[in-house]
Image (cartoon, grey):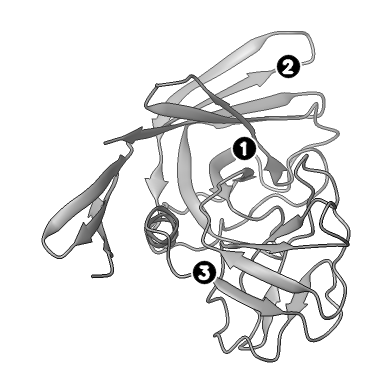
Amino acid sequence: MKPQIEAVSLFDGAIISIKRGREIIERLRLGPNDVHAMITHPDGELEDLGISQNLLTNAGRDLWAASFGQATLHAGTATSAPTATLLTDSALAGSAGLYNGWRVYFPITGLTTPLVYANCGAGGSSTTIVTDQYWTAADGTGTVPANGSAYLLVPSCFGRFMGVSGNVTAPAAGDTTLAGEETGGIGLNRTKATYAHTGGAATYTMQVAFGPLTGSPATNPIHKMALFTASNPTAAGIMLFETVLNLDATVASGDTLTITETVTLSG
């Protein structure tokens, strides 16, 4: 009997269960998760904005369940030369955004050459998948695969990229994008977070130090942050968590805004 995945929404997170028939094989409790923000001013003064708790989005729940429960993989072949932002496979037979949040892995040349991967994003079609870029295992820029290369699509839930916004609309579970996300290039653009975990602990952290800033954001102060599976708003990916900061962050040129998300996992 094939296992079923069940996700139960909670106010501050979710419970994901893998079941075979009536038997629960494995269960994971997600959340509540803390978000801490702090501003470091050019003179070294620290402004602690305190701790708030985030919202796990519906799309984030679905992706986490697919990853945790190992949804069916998909293997295929590129039928046109891939670009850094688009994979084409005439036999994909999917739907627009079907693999959003997943990862696609490609060989480059030979059995001893390391694979590259890309984070799948929103958009695309029944024959195309939008990607953020090709990456190496060391988070460098990977080689774009060739036409005719085989690939493997894997359900993945990696909220590695943090974005911020001055938009004051309250987060909602149905949100798929961070309204007003900063893209102005002053040091607040979506950034890969630094991961940290202590063995055996029920938490891990994702942290970004935005700055020192080279100007003021388009909308000031910064009101919200979010974690995404793709590195840029064009590919978008899945927004897993969305959070209103405990206190708004009023920032200026020279400031550094440090945001740390603590994700809680328990059985």
Mark 2 vs mark 3: which is more N-terminal? 2
Picture coordinates of residue 159 (x, y %)? 55, 47
User: What residue do we see at 37% from left, 33% from top?
Assistant: 264
Three-letter amino acid code at disc 1?
Answer: Pro
The N terminus lies in which quarter of the figure? bottom left
User: What residue do we see at 58% from left, 82% from top?
Assistant: 96
Q: Nearer the viewer, residue 159 or 186?
A: 159
Q: Which residue is mark 2?
A: 41
Badge 3: how crowded within 10 Å, few (<14), some, or many (20+)?
A: few
Three-letter amino acid code at disc 2?
Answer: His
Three-letter amino acid code at disc 3?
Answer: Leu
Under circle 2, the secondary element is loop
Q: Is residue 44 above or below residue 206?
A: above
Q: Is residue 83 above or below residue 207?
A: below
Residue 58 is marked as none
How far apart, in angstroms, are the residues tagged by discs 1 and 3? 42 Å
Residue 221 is marked as 1
Q: Which residue is mark 3?
A: 73
- The reply to whether callout 1 and callout 3 are in contact (CB within 8 Å) is no
User: What residue do we see at 64% from left, 65% from top?
Assistant: 120
In the image, which is nearer the foreground, mark 1 or mark 3? 3
Mark 1 vs mark 3: which is more N-terminal? 3
How far apart, in angstroms, are the residues tagged by discs 2 and 1? 15 Å
In the image, which is nearer the foreground, mark 2 or mark 1? 2
Picture coordinates of residue 13 (x, y %)? 31, 45
Picture coordinates of residue 133 (x, y %)? 79, 59
User: Is residue 12 shown to the viewer in this render?
Assistant: no
The C terminus lies in which quarter of the figure? top left
Under circle 1, the secondary element is loop
Under circle 3, the secondary element is loop
